[in-house]
Amino acid sequence: MPGEHFVVAPGWTWFILLYFFFAGISGGAYVIGTMLRLWGNPADLAASRLAFIVSFPLLLICPILLTIDLGQPARFWHMLVDAGSGALTFKAYSPMSLGVWGLTLFGLFGFVMFLAAVGEGGYLRWRILAGAGRVMGSALGKVFMVIGAIFAFFVAAYTGVLLAVSNQPVWSDTWTLGGLFLASGLSGAAATILLLSRGRREAALTEGKLMEADRYFIILELVLIALFLITLGGVVSKVLGGGWIILWLVVLVGTLVPLVAEWRPTLVRQLPPVVVPVLVLVGVLALRAVIIFSAQA
Amino acid sequence: MAQPVGFFTDTTLCIGCKACEVACKEWNGLPSNPLEFKGSYDNTGQLDHANWRHVRFVEQAGTSQDKPIAWSMMSDVCKHCANASCLEVCPTNAIVRTEFDTVFIQQDVCNGCRDCISACPYGVIGFNSNTGTAQKCTFCYDRLQNNLKPACATACPTQSIKFGPLDEMRKTAAARLDTLHQQGMSQARIYGNQEYGGLHALFLITDKPETYSLPSTESAVLPSRNNIPSYLTATVTAVVAAVAGLIAFRRRGEAKI
């Protein structure tokens, strides 16, 4: 039975919602880019490059949103450096502290992989980027990429842990949010890459694999949504009651329709191809919205 | 090293005069509350950035027609927990423990992330949109440094709010509880000896804690309890997702990249 607390809502609204959304997709895209490169065919290189090229700009939006949401944006650096002693601020048991460091380190990996993908794809013909493709394919490059993927997993997942490590009803009553946000972020990332690869012949070669992966991520997400609702126990009415059910319907449409579409394409062949990835992305946003807003209502 | 200090608030002596609230606002320069009727004599509402003391009017059904409402009054305040949820999650080290063992938010360090607000199980901390920071009772830190009692305890006309060394407050609370039990008030209990490693604001209450919007001893748990299970779920999800990726993206009879 969840503990009864008398917590006030922190007032985390639109900026935090968008931050969680972009962090999930950025982390997910990096992970997908890495997996395609590790386990895919040469034909998947273009989609992998696209994943890395998408991941970093989305990541750049995150600290901007976080900073705008602060009451004192000019003091953002207090998250990293102790204002009194000048020492680095790091609290392993505070997901917000850990998350800021995770974002910073993931930013480094994301930036390097972004440049490497841009160089490999020939989008920028800088001398320094000339051997990018060869370096990315080397053992060292792969190790670097995989370490970055660990940070990418973390960035996509920790936002859920951040909510759970509180005393807020709903958020603190479940252990599923870290996994749920990760699964949903991966699904959103697969949808984003699918959406952006439509106009690119090379990247479109991986479409089938991305759809298959998205199907698995959606199934994982649905399992975690069920676990989320089950673990809430008596508090579940707070997230399902009132108008929140509308957002849950959006989540269902954003998961079930793409699942059917990707499994049985004949059923939804009439739909324009962009509809399914867009539905996934709307579902990813709605999932975060209903969890963030309903707990604070 | 200064010794740990504490409040002992005896709700059986509180008359709801709100002198503590006024003294707190006066000393700390907090803004007055809007003049509006909230459907109760408890016109303050709750603790927040501008109300660091709040006399809670707990309204319950009375015992007879002559007494249709029974009031329990409790002057609520930050509990300055020994294991403080707010201090645990604060990412900037703005929330610190003072030499008096109290919990203090450094206003020049806080960046207004509001993580502490979602962590405090007592709903004590509020966000001041003018300063852009989280605010709560300071235990009159400036007065303590000058050997003065906190403003609320100084102003309380019935001595419902007592202040002193924490050990002394615990003894005073235990003695008062004995007296009430001897007088037949068997439902009286002390809140704050066990919760969150021991609170620096003890309360003598005459009903279960939830009646006063205080979490029960079993519910008094820290946010960090969710760290391991949440990260574990995320890790398992990551592993399953990686396996899913391996199945979906695996080479299918073509050359390796």
Image (spheres, helix red, strand yellow):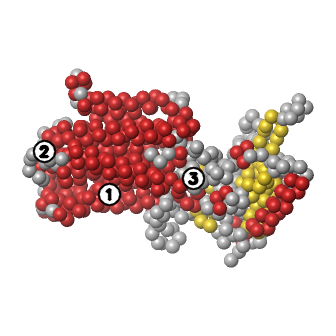
Subunit that carries the residue with mark 3: B
Image check: B194 left or right of B177?
A: left
Viewport quadrant of the N terminus of chain B: bottom right
Q: Between residue A73 and residue B200, name the one nearer to us.
A: B200
Q: For the residues carrying marks 3 and 2, which lies nearer the camera in this image?
A: 2
The numbered dot on residue A150 is 1
Q: For the residues carrying marks 1 and 2, which lies nearer the camera in this image?
A: 2
The residue under label 2 is which amino acid type? Arg
Image check: B123 left or right of A61?
A: right
Query: Which residue is under mark 3?
Result: B119
Q: How many residues crowd mark 2 within 10 Å: few (<14), some (14–19), many (20+)?
A: few
Point 53% across, 57% down: residue: B224
Q: How many residues crowd mark 1 within 10 Å: few (<14), some (14–19), many (20+)?
A: some
Up-down relation of residue A69 to residue B94 (above or below): above
Contact check, label 1 and label 3, Cβ < 8 Å:
no
Up-down relation of residue B226 to residue A221 (above or below): below
Same subunit, labels 1 and 2: the answer reads: no
Query: Which residue is under mark 2?
Result: B252
The residue under label 3 is which amino acid type? Ala
Element marked by disc 2: loop
Residue A156 showing in the rendered view:
no
Same subunit, labels 3 and 2: the answer reads: yes
The numbered dot on residue B31 is none
Q: Residue A240: where, in percent of width, then height? A: 51, 32
Q: How many residues crowd mark 3 within 10 Å: few (<14), some (14–19), many (20+)?
A: many
Q: Residue B256: where, in percent of width, then height? A: 11, 52
Q: Between residue A251 and residue A113, name the one nearer to us.
A: A251
Q: Residue B234: where, in percent of width, then height? A: 39, 51
Residue B195 showing in the rendered view:
yes
